[in-house]
Structure formats: C-alpha cells, structure tokens
C-alpha cells in the first residue's frame, strides 16, 4: 500500500481500491526471495513447465509506455514509471521482467475491461514488441474479480484482443498476423480469488 500512496494512487476515501490491491499483491513480490516470487507467478500466470518463469524478478508498478496519435509503426518506447499522459500510450498495472520473460499485468477489480479491447490491444502491442526486442517470451496477464473469464462486449478475451489488433490501422498485415498468432499463447486470465 505504501507504493500506491507514494504514486498518488490511493484516493482519500479508498474508492476504486484496484491500485491498492495491485500494490499490496504485486508490489510485495519485490520483497520475496526469488524462488518464492517465481513460484507464485508461475502458478498465477499459467506458465508451463517447459518455459517457466525464473527469478530474479524485476517488478514495476504502473510503468508507462508512450505512443502517439499518428503512429506509423509499432515503435512504442518504454518511458518507465512516470506521471505524464501521452496520447496513444498505455499504462499497464504491473511489469515484471525476468531472464526469459516480460510480463505485463492488467488488473481490474471494481472496474470493467473495455468492450472494444483498446487498452488490452495497446498493452499487448507494447509488451510483445519489447519482449521480442529483448529476446524474451511475452505474457499479458489479465486479473479480474470474475469467477469465470469475462466476456467484454459478449466476446471472449482471446477473440476480442485478436479482433482489436486486427483493426489497428497503423500495423502491416504481416505484423497483425504475427500478433494474432501470439495471442493464444501470450494471453492469460486469472481471477482475484485465485491471486490472493
């Protein structure tokens, strides 16, 4: 909770406790021994025994990826943790890097995922690109309060994300196909009851 307070993420009346929950659960990973943190994330993130997540883990809360409204490529720069809003950018709730992995985590507790999948598409593109650039595998982990996987706009997460990526006008058809092929193995959903 201290990290959330320092980042001005805790409203005075504790409304929208999503950021507090994020800080309390994922911020705590910074203080666990590598083996325990990796084991917890392997279970939570659905990592396979063939490609497990191994420590040490670097955990960042609310990292910001910049972008622009008239983007002509997928070059989204990682600007680290910051307070500046950038049009076209995105701010996943958590970024975890390990030797072989880059994981972005989008947390929803009382709020809902957007039915157009815009936020998840931006996060997927940013994470996928950075993981590929750094020679890492990529995972986008979505954590919600649902007991069953949510279906924003009546569409399952994998289909909705794939459709949103396919509708992104500044991507080449080849890159859209590459992203679409990566969605099934890179997207994972879990619920808060499982996480805590």
Image (cartoon, rainbow, N blue to C red):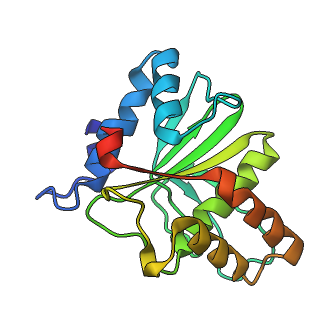
Q: Residue drawn 61% across and 29% down? A: 53
Is 54 on the left or on the right of 13, as rendered? right
Quarter of the image where one finds residue 31: top left
Q: Residue drawn 68% across and 51% down? A: 185
Q: Name the spot of residue 70 as percent of width and height, x first.
A: 71, 82
Q: Name the spot of residue 100 as percent of width and height, x first.
A: 71, 32
Q: Is residue 114 above or below residue 157?
A: below
Q: Name the spot of residue 79 as percent of width and height, x first.
A: 61, 53
| Residue situated in front as seen by the camera: 4 or 34 | 34
Q: Is residue 73 above or below residue 109?
A: below
Is 9 on the left or on the right of 50, as rendered? left
Residue reaching furthest left? 13
| Residue situated in front as seen by the camera: 9 or 34 | 34
Q: Is residue 181 above or below residue 10?
A: below
Is 113 on the left or on the right of 11, as rendered? right
Q: Residue drawn 80% across and 78% down? A: 72
How many numbered marks are there? 0
Quarter of the image with the C terminus in it: top left
Residue 77 in view of the camera: no
Residue reaching furthest right? 174
Residue 56 in view of the camera: yes
Quarter of the image where one finds residue 66: bottom right
| Residue situated in front as seen by the camera: 185 or 140 | 185
Residue reaching furthest front? 148
Quarter of the image where one finds residue 162: bottom right
Quarter of the image with the N terminus in it: top left
Q: Residue drawn 67% across and 57% down? A: 184
Is 98 on the left or on the right of 22, as rendered? right
């Amino acid at each position: 909770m201290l990290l959330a307070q320092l980042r001005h993420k805790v409203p005075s009346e504790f409304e929208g406790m999503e950021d507090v929950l994020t800080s309390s659960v994922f911020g705590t990973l910074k203080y666990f021994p590598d083996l325990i943190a990796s084991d917890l994330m392997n279970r939570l993130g659905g990592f396979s025994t063939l490609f497990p997540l191994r420590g040490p883990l670097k955990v960042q809360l609310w990292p910001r990826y910049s972008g622009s409204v008239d983007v002509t490529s997928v070059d989204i720069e990682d600007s680290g943790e910051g307070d500046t809003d950038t049009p076209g950018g995105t701010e996943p709730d958590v970024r975890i890097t390990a030797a072989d992995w880059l994981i972005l985590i989008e947390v929803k507790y009382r709020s809902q995922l957007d039915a157009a999948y815009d936020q998840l598409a931006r996060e997927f593109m940013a994470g996928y690109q950075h993981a590929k650039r750094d020679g890492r595998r990529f995972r986008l982990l979505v954590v919600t309060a649902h007991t069953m996987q949510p279906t924003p706009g009546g569409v399952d997460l994998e289909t909705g994300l794939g459709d949103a990526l396919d509708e992104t006008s500044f991507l080449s058809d080849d890159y859209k196909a590459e992203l679409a092929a990566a969605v099934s193995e890179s997207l994972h959903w879990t619920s808060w009851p499982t996480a805590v």
